[in-house]
Amino acid sequence: MNALSISDLSITFSGARKAFTAVRGVSFDVARGETFGLIGPSGCGKTTVLRAIAGLNIHWQGAISVFNDPLQPGKKISGPLRDNIQMVFQDPYSSLHPRHTIARILGEPLALRGAGDIAAQVRTALDQVGLPAAASQRYPHQLSGGQRQRVAIARALLLRPNLLLLDEPTSALVVGHMCDRAAIMGGGVITQILDRAGLSKAG
């Protein structure tokens, strides 16, 4: 079973004067347990693809299926699938409540799901992403961009998603060490899909 299947995905944004197609005919599959990367320059469509998969942009055409569960264009993701897809942004400052401590930011999703021993789970999650327990008492503005990204990763992992989407987690120079395969994007289309060996040669 594939974790993710995308077929002929196209995404168009309507502007004041004319429409702009940011993603055109993108297709790829990601196997369960596989690490797959999207590589390309800024503005090539990588984040736009991820936002569609995460349900943050519901205005798309084509087909997206997550663990054989098809997403519906024009409809928000709901039910168990919503927890199973988590996205971490490059600097997730806007997604972290500015007036809540890190402990509350990480703990609230667990509390809503009736989890027990939330404080211990929060401490473990912070440790897993390399942050000290004391960080739990800080506010987002008291952390660096990199630390905020680690908090967002910890929050995503606490929900134990089956599909984790990372927006710009690292440079393309080391993506070959992280990914089993990767798609090269440019101008909203996929120009090439490389396996690990191909990535090593490209790097």
Image (cartoon, grey):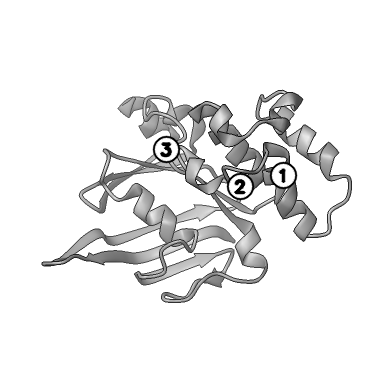
**Residue flagged by tag 1: what amino acid is it?**
Arg
**Mark 2: few, some, or many residues within 10 Å (few <14, many ≥20)?**
few
Quarter in which the N terminus is drawn: bottom right
Residue at screen point 37% across, 49% down: 47
- Mark 3 or mark 1: which is in front? 1
**Residue flagged by tag 2: what amino acid is it?**
Gly
Front residue (pair 68, 158): 158
Quadrant position of residue 63: bottom left
Front residue (pair 8, 87): 87
The span from disc 3 to disc 1 (Cα, nearest Å) is: 26 Å
The span from disc 1 to disc 2 (Cα, nearest Å) is: 31 Å
Residue at screen point 37% across, 30% down: 172
Q: Are marks 1 and 2 in contact (CB under 8 Å)?
A: no
User: From the viewer's perspective, is 121 left or right of 67?
Assistant: right
Q: Is label 3 in a helix, a strand or a loop?
A: loop
Q: Mark 1 or mark 2, which has the lower sequence index?
A: 2
**Mark 1: few, some, or many residues within 10 Å (few <14, many ≥20)?**
some
Q: Position of residue 133 (x, y in %)?
A: 76, 26
Q: Position of residue 11 (x, y in %)?
A: 30, 64
Badge 1 is on which residue?
104
The span from disc 3 to disc 2 (Cα, nearest Å) is: 20 Å
**Residue flagged by tag 3: what amino acid is it?**
Glu
Return the mark for residue 168. Answer: 3
Quarter in which the C terminus is drawn: top left
**Mark 3: few, some, or many residues within 10 Å (few <14, many ≥20)?**
some
Badge 2 is on which residue?
33
Q: Are marks 3 and 1 in contact (CB under 8 Å)?
A: no
